[in-house]
Amino acid sequence: MLLNQAAANSMIMVILYVAIFGAIIYFISVRPQRKQQKAAEAMHASMQAGDSVLTTSGFYGVIIDIMDDTVIVEFGSNRNCRIPMTKDAIAAVEKPNLAKTEDE
């Protein structure tokens, strides 16, 4: 009888360790990744034509048109350099500064 209680206690400890390890993994890797994904989705949802963007490959450009999952980005001052790409290829968005100073 005493042996069965020891085995039961041992099994409870193993289950407890697995649960604690699972919680640690969740808070270290899964939760921050989901938070980053939500921020990227919010950034992609707020994109508009005329916004300056940085692509994941390191190119700066301006959004010309936005479709469902594709954006057309113009690079440099050359009007012939318009490239369609997925929204996931946009790493950062900078809104144009439309605020005018009151001194002028």
Image: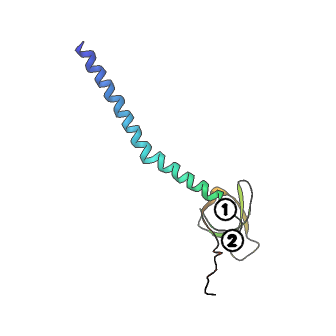
Counting other residues with Cα less than 10 Å from the Cα at mark 1, is it few (<14), some (14-19), or many (20 or more)?
Answer: many
Residue at the bottom extreme of this rendering: 104
Decide if residue 4 is on the left or right side of residue 81: left
The residue that appears at 37% across and 38% down in the rendered structure is 21
Q: Residue furthest top?
A: 1
Which SS class for mark 1? loop
| Circle number at residue 4 | none
Residue extending farthest to the left is 2
Task: Decide: few, some or many residues near mark 2? Use Cα within 10 Å; few <14, some 14-19, many ≥20.
Answer: some
* 55 to 15, vertically: above or below: below
- Judged by depth in the image, the label closer to the viewer, 2 or 1, is 1
Which residue is located at x 70 percent, y 54 percent?
A: 69
Residue drawn 61% across the image and 54% down it? 41
Q: Pinpoint residue 60: horizontal percent, then vertical percent.
A: 63, 70
Instruction: Provide residue 75's location: percent of width, then percent of height.
Output: 69, 71
Which is more N-terminal, label 1 or label 2? 1
Name the amino acid type tagged 2. Phe
Residue labelled with disc 1: 47
Quadrant location, the N terminus: top left
Query: Which element carries disc 2, helix, strand or loop?
Result: loop
Instruction: Determine which quarter of the picture holds residue 95.
Output: bottom right
- Return the residue nearer the eye: 32 or 58: 32
Q: Give the distance between the C-alpha atoms of the residues marked 2 and 1, in whole angstroms.
A: 17 Å
Can you identify the residue that label 2 sits on?
A: 75
Q: Which quarter shows the C terminus?
A: bottom right
The residue type indicated by label 1 comes to Met
Q: Position of residue 62 (x, y in %)?
A: 68, 69
